[in-house]
Image (cartoon, rainbow, N blue to C red):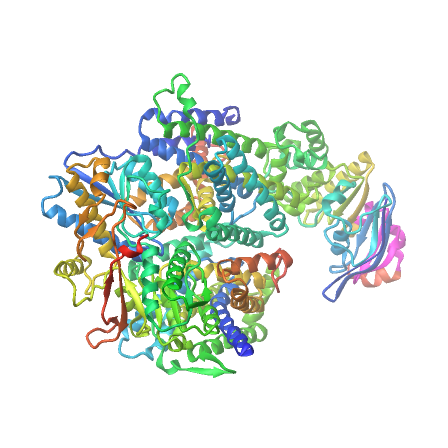
Amino acid sequence: MAAEFLFSQFLSGLTTAIFLFLVASGLSLVFGVLRVLNFAHGTFYMLGAYLAWQTMAWLAPTKEGFWLAALAAATGIAILGFVVERLMFRHLYGKEELYQLLFTYALVLILGDAAKILWGTGQLSVSRPPSVEGSLSVFGALLPGYNLFVMVLGFAIAIGFWVILQRTSAGRMIRAAAMDREMLGSLGANVGVLYTGVFVVSSFLAGLSGALVSPIKAIVPGMDVEIIVEAFIVVVIGGLGSFWGTFLGALIYGQVLSFGILIFPRFSIFSVFALMAVILIVRPWGLLGRPLK
Amino acid sequence: MRRRTLLASAAASAAILPGRARAANEIKIGMPMALSGPGALYGQPITKGAEMCVAEINAAGGLLGRKLILLPRDSKGNADESVRVSRELILKDNVDFIVGSFTSAESPAVSTIAKENKVLMVAPTAKTIQLTSPANLHPYIFRTASTTDIEGRTAATLMAKWDVKRVATIAPDYAYGRDIMEAFSVLLKKLKPGVEIVDQQWPKLGQADFAPFITAQMSKQPDAVFGAVFAGDFASLVKQAKPLGYFDKIGNRYIGAGETGSIEMTRSLGTDYPVGIVANTYDPVIWPDAPEVHKKFTAAIKTHLKDDYGSSWAIMGYAGVQALAAGIKKAATIDADKVSKAMIGLTFETPIGPQIIRGKDQSANRGQFWGKLVRTAAHPFPVFEKVEYTDPTPFMD
Amino acid sequence: MSRRIPWTLVVLLLALTIPWFGSRYYTFLATQIAILSLFAVSYNLLLGTTGLVSFGHAAYFGLGAYATGLLMKELNVPFLLALLAGGLLPAAFAGVFGYFCVRLTKIYFSMLTLAFAQIVWAICFQWNEVTGGDQGISAIPYPELGWIGAIPGLGGFRTGDHFYFACVVLVILCIWVLGRITDSPFGRLLTTIRENPERASFIGVDVRRYELAAFAIAGGFAGVSGALFGIFNRGVFADFMFWPKSAEVLIMTILGGMNYFWGPVAGTIMMVVLNQQITSYTEYWPLVLGTILLVLLFAFPGGLMGALDAGAKRLRGQKTGGGDA
Amino acid sequence: MLDIDNVTKTFSGFTAVSGVSLTVEKQQIAAVIGPNGAGKSTFFNMITGHLTPDSGAIRLNGRDITGIAPHKICGAGMGRSFQRTNIFPKLTVFDNVQAAYLAHRGKGGNFWSPAERFYRDETEALLRSIGLWEQRESIGGVMSYGAQKQLELGLALASDPALLLLDEPTAGMSATETHEAIRLLERIAGERELTLLFTEHDMEVVFSIAQKIAVLHQGRKIAEGTPAEVRADPEVRRIYLGHH
């Protein structure tokens, strides 16, 4: 009994972690290359959820349309990311870091209100697709099929990233950018294209994760800031620019929340900030990060 | 040189004109309300309800021969912003009354301002008992909302009817959640001494990940749950709890406070709604046994909101203005002190029938609609099987 | 040449004239601007002077508000004493939190300041017994300032005006002190940290200690402004410490121009007035604010003061027939 | 004066400096040379406290300064200039140097008096001696490269060092600038009775002013001696001077 319970609590934490990792992965990628913490990442995530809902509303009769809707939402947000990067963001490269940060915050404000104008203030909801409706029992703990699907996808994205980072020339450039900016220039990389590409991929991931959480979380105004703070923290405790650090950060956060509430029932409101404070005090550059130059 | 900026800015701020002087043929009502941020979900329909009431009164010739003017302002759901806009309404727009402030954090704050400026205020939605506790009561604060006491205690009477021994709770970790749980458990233990509270979960307000709370609670094997998780948080809870078998395991013996039975909630969750649970709402909206006045109100609000189903929240703004209007009418003046006196013991009409403002805590006897949610062929979302209005009078002290 | 004009005094005198307009609303608006100006100027000691981007300055604002509010309401402590506590307590907290924060740099520093601020917020949000939880502490008494009415010429004013006079004098006093600190050798060495921390350490600046001192001083003055704001607002709430408040002070400072000592004041005036004007018409204040930010970033990166400064230079250049604009 | 004893520094498996010792006598002008990646910068950063050696010891006037903070080493009488120009770019030339005086002479604890009143004469004298007095109102970061280097020297001198470490003092300079910079250095070192330790890639510069030269290669010291001795060293000729 006790072991079963601990395992199901672990699975709950893992679910929390993987959903958070999906969002944080794109944030981590952009930070590694562009050296900007993109506040608007959470807004892209929220817009992804809204777009998925909208596509579902258009595809009304078929619930399996969710898969298409998720893809459409992710693509839509990737296009939005492309436009934002090309038209505006790139003009701020080379300016002070703070201004880039403020730019992304301005996007949060503007796009947040735009979503409110388009979809209202009420909550929206997307149903789980029937193909992953059921749940399966793992060592006596119940694991919903949809969560399992997202977990597999989360791990697949993590491994996929690892392969891309290690094995492709784009990956080498991304790693170089994360480690040493001067090296990037000497690699002869087309920095402009790399930045746009990374921003678009990150936006795609934000849109995708927004669409993927819509069957398990309500779509409400304000979900953008709620998630961005958590995602930021996961990226920071993992070590900025470190992809595996983000993965590890998310896993730790999930378990800290999951088991923290067993010990301190009123821990939830502190959890993520307490975790960040402790980790940054002990390891000033995050778990797998290196000092910023 | 650059310090000239300062002078220029000072001059610019001086250019803002203070509000027009009070017109003799108008009665101005300021309405600080959460129109942006998470609270906008409620604030918007509440404001629409108040708007409609004002329009109806004006169409019928106004009040004391004067026209009502409603000035809604976005409080952003923040206490300090609420205070700021309330003062602005009083000092700049010269409002005669205030109907509004949304949350339990905003309302006591605005109440202080009302008292200081001797402007009478009606709080249409604030549930905190602190608002009208003896220490905080003053002649200029009235409440037409239900309270955490009423909500928690009426839920306890429902729970007491069930054959359950092990009860768990889940509520957002802040004053509302803790007050309602306190009210609930004290009365439940009195009504049903054998019952045991086996688990209490406190997710934060705005929690999106409920899985850890759900599995932790299920491990304590409760027979029934009283929940006060509301709005988007409730939707997230349900979506994550259902596939974990949470509702099945307790045989749907879940009582959901925080207006989780509202039509907004059932509509947005649709087929994902955990049918079989008992939940509350301010206005059942789809209510076959409704009194005539409610049917009329529902028809009107549907048109006003341009929505096929209306809203369960609009009634709160509507009734708040009704209470104030009745008070002004009875006092036959807009003098705040006289209206205040007139409102004590006042009976006023609302879409769910007449309500009384008692003197003790200057609060209306606004009760709770509780009912079990079921699926029917008539609607694409769950509706109340049979909704019952619980008179709050026995639970108000 | 502009240094010879005692700007602090000029601002003080100008600000003191507001109640003579006779509008309670002007006084109300001016009080808000005065108090928040101090908040922003204290923040700029970190941002503009030392180059530290704190995401948690609101914590010290809120701590000051709670300290003074509780002392005045629960223990009837006299105003000035309570205000002093409202400065010292946040300074002490800033000293402790800052000790850990200044060991970090750049975005890590910012995130740790955020973490501490949010933890403090969460405690205040939850601790019903002391802080009143999310409902905060209402009905904080006004200080006893009736004696102001006894000053010749100030007889005809209301309580709100008296409080405004007190606020303006206190705020200007604090801003003056902050100005002295900024211009002092200590302040000058803070600017070397902003410019080049590595170099600063090798002209003999103990970077962390200086940063910590600046952090504690800024926290203390933020606390004083929070204390005044709590009284002005007639209540103290956990919202005071929530991170959007920290974002707000950051935006106000940049809006006004972080490279100018009076920049944050200009930014505060702009924010307060705009917010007040725009919320009267629409609930889409974030949309407006976001657009203003975009315009600022792309067109006026020096903020309001920067834009005016550039404009004034150009004007001067034209008059003298050329020169470097 | 400066006594470096067998210092080693390793970065994640890569040994940047391995067991290097060096002694610099009072008022000596010494140079450390070596090809790119020889470990010169790491060596310097250990001396100035920006890096802590894994092993070995560094003594300044007999006092152990191994691994102590840069600002303390600065206080102990060591000044330094950096390879990449390292000034306070948005401050004026005058304020740059004045700040260095404020810091070095411990005025940082003064929160009250206007900073501009302090050390005006000292700053003026120093700016005149390094030839920047005319440009005192210029913003540091917008001056010519050579002038920035001069300013950096000024920052180092303001802390009244007995020992001055210069990392590539003429890097990026034109031939004329280099010539002037070297003359300035020699003059200042003479006037102030300074001990100089510098790295430099321009061999002409090194051999024209250094009294002692140490050669680093792949983190090890392979030769040390007078310019003539180093020039004659066969290994140095082979691996280093041969490249030129």
Q: Is residue C93 left or right of residue D176?
A: left
Q: Is residue B168 left or right of residue B94?
A: right
Q: Is residue A293 left or right of residue D189?
A: left
- Total labels: the figure holds 0
Which is more toward the observer, B190 or A179?
A: B190
Q: Please tell me whether residue B216 is drawn above or below residue C189 in the rendered image.
A: below
Magenta segment includes A102:
no
* Residue at 56%, 40% in the rendered image: C89
Outermost residue toward the top in this view: C152
* Residue B247 place in picture, x, y as percent: 38, 75
* Residue C49 place in picture, x, y as percent: 56, 40
Q: Please tell me whether residue B47 is drawn above or below residue D127 in the rendered image.
A: below
* Residue at 59%, 48% in the rendered image: C97
Which is more toward the observer, A25 or B377?
A: B377
Q: Tell me which corner region of the image, top left, top right, bottom left or bottom right, holds residue A132.
A: bottom left
Q: Is residue C321 visible?
A: no
Which is more toward the observer, A108 or C228?
A: C228
* Residue D55 place in picture, x, y as percent: 81, 58
* Residue A142 place in picture, x, y as percent: 46, 79
The residue stretch that appears in magenta? D206-233
Q: Tell me which corner region of the image, top left, top right, bottom left or bottom right, holds residue A289.
A: bottom right
Which is more toward the observer, B48 or A20?
A: B48
Q: Is residue B291 visible?
A: yes
Q: Please tell me whether residue A192 is drawn above or below residue D86 in the rendered image.
A: below
Q: Please tell me whether residue A14 is drawn above or below residue C135 in the rendered image.
A: below
